[in-house]
Image: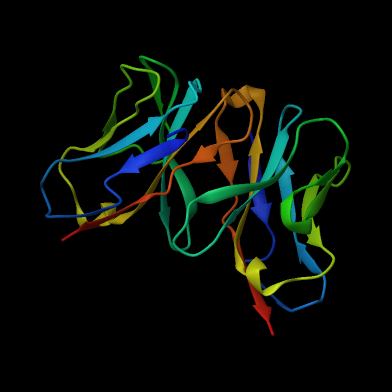
Amino acid sequence: DAGITQSPRYKITETGRQVTLMCHQTWSHSYMFWYRQDLGHGLRLIYYSAAADITDKGEVPDGYVVSRSKTENFPLTLESATRSQTSVYFCASSDEVDEQFFGPGTRLTVL
Amino acid sequence: AQSVTQLDSHVSVSEGTPVLLRCNYSSSYSPSLFWYVQHPNKGLQLLLKYTSAATLVKGINGFEAEFKKSETSFHLTKPSAHMSDAAEYFCVVSDLGNAGKSTFGDGTTLTVKP
């Protein structure tokens, strides 16, 4: 199916565990983004990627790792999850300075 | 540098009355501006975008926005609110100086009363 998908949609984990959130897009967009959404903070950029093998930090990158070996995939890894990383995570893709297409989100709870 | 300020965190209107959601922006370049809508427990959907063409932009579901460079504003309006418009709305600015990154406002929650 065309579009942008995220998996899992819901995840519960424990403090200290490693968690990977997956993001896949079928448009061959050059840019991909990871945001977290928390009450009172809107969407905050974690990491972004301008192309395969090119990634850069956003506003809140600490505790997260990304990779982009293929244009269509942009996984986000929490190396050692903390309670403060409980949030809703959105992946998005776009071409240059243009509309971003958002995935449905992953709701992550860290106990 | 780019930034965006949504002037109201909450707006409440009655069904059938006009909607005004205010957004001011700052950009060092000629910006692209967007409004997104997010319904509860959903992802974000584009309502409309301005990319240096016509200053009055029409979007989906009867929404429109006017780019006013002199006022650095991009306010979102709709002549008549519908119950289904109740959602969170985000104003977003992007410019070429930020390598494709966008800056999101903190959002405005629109409540529509019957």
Residue at x 56%, y 56% (from the top left corner): B106
Residue at x 76%, y 32% (from the top left corner): B51
Q: For this rendering, which residue is in front, A81 or B70?
A: A81
Q: For this rendering, which residue is in front, B9 or B41?
A: B41
Of the 4 image quadrants, the one containing the N terminus of chain B is top right
Q: Is residue B83 left or right of residue B38?
A: right
Which residue lies most toward the bottom here?
B114
Residue at x 54%, y 62% (from the top left corner): B39
Residue A50 drawn above or below residue B94: above
Where in the figure is residue B17, as x and y percent of width and height? 82, 76
Where in the figure is residue A14, as x and y percent of width and height? 11, 55
Q: Is residue A23 left or right of residue B58?
A: left
Residue at x 66%, y 52% (from the top left corner): B5
Where in the figure is residue B101, as x and y percent of width and height? 55, 31
Residue B104 drawn above or below residue B9: above
Q: Is residue B73 left or right of residue A109?
A: right
Q: Quadrant of residue A110?
A: bottom left
**Count of numbered labels shown in the rendering:** 0
Residue B80 drawn above or below residue A11: below
Q: Is residue B99 left or right of residue B113?
A: left
Of the 4 image quadrants, the one containing the C terminus of chain B is bottom right
Where in the figure is residue A85, as x and y percent of width and height? 27, 52
Q: How is the image coloured?
A: rainbow
Which residue lies most toward the front here?
A1
